[in-house]
Image: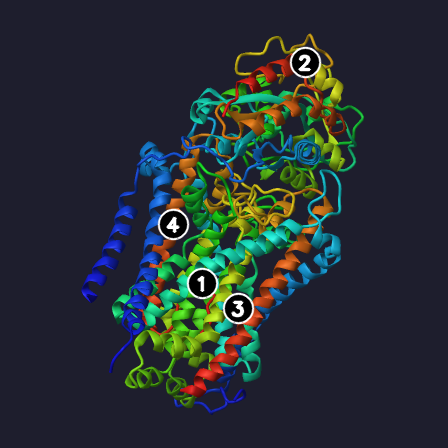
Amino acid sequence: MSATAGQMGPGPALRGDGRLRRRRLVNRLMEISASIAALVAVAVLAIVIISVASKGISSISIEFLTKNAPLFGQSGGGIANAIVGTLILVALATVMAVPVGILIGIYTSEFAGARLASLVRFVLDILNGVPTIVTGIFVFGLLVAGKAQSGWAGAFALAVIMLPIVARSAHEVLALVPKAMKESALALGVTRWKMVLRIVLPTAAGGIITGALLGVARVAGETAPLLFTSSIFANEVSTKPGGALASIPVKIFSLTEEPSPSAHSQAWGAALLLIFFILLLNVLARAIYARSSRRTTRAR
Amino acid sequence: MKTRKIGALASAALLMLGVAACGSSSKEKGSESSGASSGSKTLVGAGSTLVAPLITGDWIPEYQEKAKVAVTYGPIGSGGGIAQITARTVDFGASDAPLTEDEFKEAKGVVQIPWALAATDVAYNVEGVGNELKLTGPLLAEIYEGKITTWNDSKIAALNPGVKLPAEKITPVYRSDGSGDTFAFTNFLSHVSPQWASKIGHSTTVSFPVGIGGKGNSGVGADITNTKGSIGYIAIAYVLANKFDYALVENAAKKFPVPGIPSIEAAAKTLKSIPANNEATIVDPPASAPEAYPISTFTYALVPLKSPKADLLKPFLKWAVTTGQEFGPKLDFAPLPPEIVAADEATIGKIES
Amino acid sequence: MRRGLTDRIGDPTLRSLTTLASLAAVALLVLIVYKVFDQAGEAFSHFGLSFVWESEWNPVTKQFGAADFLYGTAVTTFAAILIAAPMSIAIALFLTELAPRQIRRPVGVLVELLAAIPSVVLGLWGIIVLSPVLLKTIEPALKSALGWIPLFSGEASPVGLLPAILILTIMAVPIISAVTREVFETVPGDLKEGALALGATRWEMVKMVVLPYSRTGIVGATILGLGRALGEAIAVTMVIGHTEHISANLFGPADTAASRIASEYLGATSSLQISSLAYLAAILLVLALVVNMIARLIVRRAHPKIPTTPGILR
C-alpha cells in the first residue's frame, strides 16, 4: 500500500515533468516530516525513560526501599515512608473513586436518557479538565484548613482526579455490551438490576478494571493535589491516614530541590520506581483490555 | 419522574454557573476552629527551613527517644510556618521572621518563642575567586537590584584587591517560598540601603527585581550549585553541609567577621531587652560590636496560647530551649542567651489547653 | 410472573444509587467552583477585576495582581501548543496514513505512554537533563541565529520560559495526537481513494480531503491540549525560575499562575495573599472550564463518537 501514491500517472491538469517532480518532492518531504514527528515523540519518551533508568538504577537498593531519609547532611537512606504512603494514598483513593465511578458509568449507560447521560458525561469531562493544583486548593479549603493535613485529605484529592477517568471508561465499555444480550435477558424476565449485575458488569469487567488501573496509574504520579493536603509528613513509615502521609511524587519534588548530588540520585531512584510502577499499570491495563475486548467482540 | 431528574441535574448545573458568575465573598476562615492532627501522642509542626536541620536531625530523634512523643516537622519555609499555624493545620509553626502586628492579629492568640540562634550566609558559585570574598550591604543591595551585574564590577574589585574576578554575569538567587532568610536578608539590606528600604522593603517574601527563585534553603542551594556566577542568601547550616563558598559581609563597625558561632553570639549580645512579644531582631548590630556578624537571626517557635496539645507542646518546647541547645553548635547554631531562655520559659508557662 | 422482594426493591435501589452517584459528580464540580471562589472572595472584594491586569505582586505592600503570571501562562501555553499542534497532526497522519500496519499500534501506544509520565518526573528531567543542554547549546545557538528577534535576544539561563514550554509541549502532544488520530480515522475511505484515483499524491490527498474533513476535530483536539498545558503546576514550577516580571526574553525566568500557586500557597502569611492565590486559582479554573467546554463541544459536535477524556481506553 505504500508505493502507490503519486504513481497513478498525471491527471489532465498535471502536465509537465517539472511540475510532477515538484509535487512528488513535496509529497516526499511531507511524508518524511510526519515520520520524523512520530520518531521525535517516541525518541523523547525513550530519552526520558533511559535518563531515569540510567540515573536511577544505581540508587535502587534494599536500603533505598526499606529506610527513610538520612539525617541532615548525611547521605544514604531511602524512601520507605514515601513508598508505603503512596500505596496507602492510592489504595484509599481507589476505594473512594472506583465504586462511585462504576455507578456513574452504569447510570449513564443503562438508566439515564440520552440527553441526561450526555450531560453527566460532559460534567465528567469538565471535571477531568480541572487543573490538579486547583483540586489541591479545593481540598485544602474543604478538609485541611482549621484541621490538619491528612492521608484522608490527600486520598480524597486523588479520588477527585480519578473519578472522571473511572466513570468515563466504565461508560465506554458498558456501552459496548451488545444490546441483543441485554434485551434477550430482559425478555426472559430477568429484572434490570440482575441483568446489570449478572450480565452487563461481568461482560464489561475487563474494560472496567482497565479504566480503574488507568485511574490508579494517573493519580500515582500526581504531586500537585498532595502539596497542600499531605506534604507535612514524618520521616518514618506511617500507615495511619489520620496524619499526613509521604508519597513518592512529593518526595521527588523535594529531593529535586536539594543541592546535594546524593539527593538528586535519590530523586532519580524514586522517579525510576514511580515510572516503572506507572508503566507497568499501563501495560497491564492495555493487556486486560485487549483480552476483554476480544471477548466482547466475539459475543457480539 | 424523568423530568424531575433532569430538573435536579439542570438546577445543579445552573447553581454551578451562578457561583462561577458572581463568585462568592462569604468569609469563612479556618482559624477559629483548632485542633491539628488527630492521634494522641503526636506533634506536627512546619515552617522554617533554616532551623530544619536542627529539628529533624537532632531534636526529633532525641526527643522521640526520650519523651515517647512522635514529632513531625515539615520544612516548608517560615512563611509556611506562619501561614499554617494561622490556619491551625499544625500544632506549632516555626519562623525565623518575628510576626508582624498584622500577622499576630490574623493568627489570633499565637505567641512566638525564640528557640534557636543562627545566621543567614551569602554564598556564591564563582570559579577561581576562592572563599571569603568581601562584600558590603549596599553592594549586595545593588546586586539584588540588578545594578551590579558582573563579578568583575569595579566596586567588588575595590573590596577584594588581589582577587581575580571573572567577567561573569551575576545571577542572584532568592527564595520562592515565604522565608525567614528572606526576612533577615532584606531586613539587613533595608537597614544599610535607604534605596532598598523604600523600593523593595523587607518581609518573608518580597518582589525581587532580578534573579531566580529556589524553594527552601535546599532549593536556593540547588540553584547556587547549578548556576555558574550565582550568589544567594542561605542558612549557615546549609553552607556548612554543602561546602559552599561564602562571603564576608561588612558590619556596622566596617569589619568583615567570619559567619560562625562567635560572630553570631557577638551579635546576640547587642540585644538590650526582650519585649513582651519576644521579638529579638539582631540584624545589623551597632558598631559597638565589631565582632558581630550582621545577618544573624533568632528563629522562633509559633504556638497558640490555647492548644489542645498543650500538655505535649510545653515539655517539648521547654526541652528544646534548654537541653535541645546542646545539639546546635555542630550545625553552627549558637546557644540561646540565658535571658532569652528565661523569657521563653515564662511564655511557655502561659500556654494552656 | 411473581417476583420476590429483592427483585422488587433491586431495580429502584440500583437506579437511585447510580443516580445518586451521578448527582455526586455534578455536586463535586459545583463544590470545587464554590470552594475556590469562596477562598478568593477577600481578594476579589479587595482588588475587583483589576486583579487580572495589574502586574504588581508584592507581599510587602500587599498589592497583588495576576498580570505577570497570566502572561507567563499565556506565553508558555501558546508556545507549547504552537509546537505541539503541528507535531501532533504530523504524528496522527503518520499513524493513520503512512506507517506500515504492524508498527501503527506500537508507535501509537508509545506516543500515548508519553502522557503517562508523571509531571514531577518530567520536571526532574527538565531541570537536570534538559536545562543544561538548553543553556549550553540550544539557547546560544538560537541567540546567534535569531538574536535580532527580542524573544531570542536575552541571556541564556538554566531556568526560564524555554524549558517550561518544551515540557508543556511534551505533555500536550499525546493528548492532541490521540484525539486527532481518532478524527482522521473517521475520514471516509472512499473520499481518500477518490483523491488518489484522480492522481493526487498522498500529501495532496491529505491536504484536499483529510485535513478539511477533520478541521473542526483538530481545532477541538488542540484546545484540549491547551487545557492540559494551562493548568500544569509542578513541572513548570521546577523549571521556570519564579520571578514576577514580564520580559519578552524566552530564555529568562518567569512564572505562571499554576506555578505561583504551587510555590506560595502553603507559605502565604497574610490572608489577602492566600486569597489572592485562590483568586489566581479561580481564574485558572474558569479558563480551564471554558477551554474544556469549548473543546469538548467542538469535538462532540463534529465527532460524537470520540470520547474526549484523555487517558481512557476505547
Which amino acid is tagged 4?
Leu
Which amino acid is tagged 3?
Glu
Q: Which residue position is annotated with label 4?
A: C285
Q: Which residue position is annotated with label 2?
A: B338
Q: Which residue position is annotated with label 3?
A: C112
Query: Closer to the observer: label 4 or label 2?
Result: 2
Q: Is residue B286 above or below residue C282?
A: above
B9 to the left or right of C135:
left
Q: Chain of mark 3?
A: C
**Is residue C193 in view from this perspective?**
yes
Q: Earlier in the sequence, mark 4 or mark 3?
A: 3
Which amino acid is tagged 2?
Pro
Horizontal and vertical percent for residue A162?
Answer: 46, 59
Q: Nearer the viewer, residue B186 or A92?
A: A92
Query: Closer to the observer: label 1 or label 4?
Result: 1
Q: Label 4, label 2: how many angstroms apart (C-alpha)?
A: 52 Å
The part of the image, by quadrant, that contains residue B298 is top right
Say if labels 4 and 3 share a chain. Answer: yes
Task: Find numbered disc 3 in the image and state the secondary structure of the residue it sits on.
Answer: helix
Check if mark 3's residue and mark 1's residue have beta carbons within 8 Å: no
Say if labels 4 and 2 share a chain. Answer: no
A205 to the left or right of B140:
left
